[in-house]
Amino acid sequence: MIICAYAIPAHFLFRHLTRSEDCQLNAQPYPALWIKVCEEPNLTKIMTTSPVNIYLVGKTGTGKSATGNSLLGRQAFESGPSTTSITATVSAQSAEIEGRRITVVDGPGIGDTGVSREQTIIESSRFLEEVMSACPDGYHALLLVFRYGTRFTEEDRATLATLKILLGKDFVRKHAILVVTCGDNLIQEMGAQVGGEAPSSSLFSQWLNSQSGDLAALVEELEGRAVLFNNMSKEANILSAQRGELFKAVDNLCNQGLRYSQNDFLACSMSRQIALVETKAEKVSAETKTKLDKISSEMTTVMSKAQASANDISSKLGQLEALFAQIKAVLQSVEEQDEGTGALNNVKAMVEAQRKSVDDAVQGIKVLLQQRKQQDKEEEERRRAQAEMLRQQEEMRKQAELRQQEEARQAEERRLQQEAENQRREAEAKQREQELQRQLAEEQEKRKKLEAEEAARRAAAAAAAAQQAMIQQQQAIMRSMFFR
Ligand SMILES: Nc1nc2c(ncn2[C@@H]2O[C@H](COP(=O)(O)OP(=O)(O)O)[C@@H](O)[C@H]2O)c(=O)[nH]1
Ligand SMILES: [Mg+2]
């Protein structure tokens, strides 16, 4: 590849690189070629004529706008001694400086004292979109502006961490350059310390090397890319020199074939989203906890209610299902607010845990209701069977009673029949007896009559005999008389 690079005519490279304005895109079809070209000292001119897009990042008052003005060589941005942000909007300004088109984008401060991390994330996420739109080709460098004379505080360290979330974890290493403003003060103070006429670059190097802690770590991460700016200077050669130092650093970044583009910004949109959601995590968590506590206390009340009957259990189940629906709504709300970032996973886990507990209760009550219904069914069947048994017993009792009554009736009937029979027999006997009596009487009467007749007959016979005798006597008399 190196041989190829040298084989390509220089006029082709020059035309190619100056036409496109995009060393990163140009680098893509010929990566090895471009790197080699940039390393080639006699081709430096090609690079320095390419445009440079810059975005100024830092706290309010660090000198971002002043640095932008220094770079553009005019008062493009409002700059002044204010602790609150003068620069409230994103602004892009361009200038043609020494044959190079410079575009500088300035915006509100990030990580200002008194501004919460949450607010920083919310506001910065919004205006960084504008920053990216302001320069659709992307940025050749992101300038981390730090003011000499102030301490690199814990707050600055936290802001840097936030910036890595907003712009991507690699933005410092790949795209950033440290700009230390108030270079005039640094030169004055360091010069006074060192004494004599040391060049400003060496005083700046000494100062940088004397740093420790977070600032030193930042410079290390930047692989030493740091430039000193005196924004108070009106001297063209000083302004040109510090601009040149910055461009050298920018071109070094560019030489690595990198530019902070929309793609880089979009690549960390999820981390921004996560951070944005995290800003409301505490509030969401507190609100969710309040809702869950309410549901929990309602659940305690519901669970303490009676469950003697299937109706009790059924009503309890209904109330628990209503609570379950409430929890589902809470979970849905958390999921919506989470926006798929997972930043509210802890809150979701809290809701899930309670959802599970209500679900367990619902399932338990369902089982209980099932059992109770089964019991009630069995009880009903048992009752029905018992009622049927009682009915049958009653039936049998009634039948027995009817049978008894029938038997009694029959017995009575028999008795009555018997009695009637007896009476009939008695009557018959009596009748017979009377008949006998009558017959006897008749017999007696007859006998008496016979006897009377007999007596009469005898009497008659006797009378006849007597008469006969008398007759005979008379006849005898007569005969006697007659025969006499
Ligand atoms: N002495 C000195 N003051 C500076 C320098 N750069 C900025 N300032 C001052 O610092 C203050 C804040 O600057 P400004 O550009 O508005 O900061 P910004 O809020 O980051 O945009 C202003 O009063 C500037 O004049 C510098 O290099 N030297
Ligand atoms: Mg400003």
Image (cartoon, helix red, strand yellow):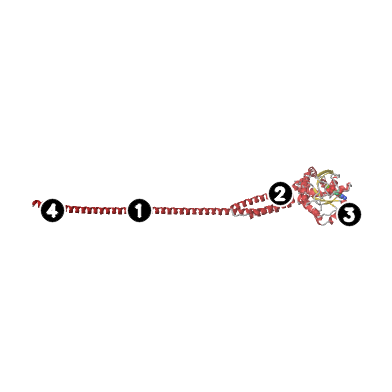
Alpha-carbon neighbours of circle 1 within 10 Å: few (<14), some, or many (≥20)? some
Residue closest to the eye, 311 or 370:
311
Q: Position of residue 378 (x, y in %)?
A: 54, 54
Q: Mark 2 and mark 4 in contact (Cβ < 8 Å)?
A: no
Q: Amino acid at mark 3?
A: Glu
Marked residue nearer the N-terminal end (2 or 3):
3
Residue closest to the eye, 335 or 249:
335
Alpha-carbon neighbours of circle 3 within 10 Å: few (<14), some, or many (≥20)? some
Q: CA distance from mark 2 to mark 1?
A: 111 Å
Badge 2 element: helix
Q: Amino acid at mark 1?
A: Gln
Mark 3 highlights which residue? 189
Q: Which mark is residue 423?
A: 1
Q: Residue at x 71, y 49 (%)?
A: 337
Marked residue nearer the N-terminal end (1 or 4):
1
Indicate which label's residue lies in the foreground, 2 or 3. Answer: 2
Q: Which mark is residue 473?
A: 4
Q: CA distance from mark 1 to mark 4?
A: 66 Å
Q: Position of residue 468 (x, y in %)?
A: 15, 52
Marked residue nearer the N-terminal end (2 or 1):
2
Q: Position of residue 82 (x, y in %)?
A: 85, 48
Q: Residue at x 37, y 54 (%)?
A: 419
Mark 2 highlights which residue? 337
Q: CA distance from mark 4 to mark 2?
A: 177 Å
Marked residue nearer the N-terminal end (3 or 1):
3
Residue 99 in sight from this viewpoint: no
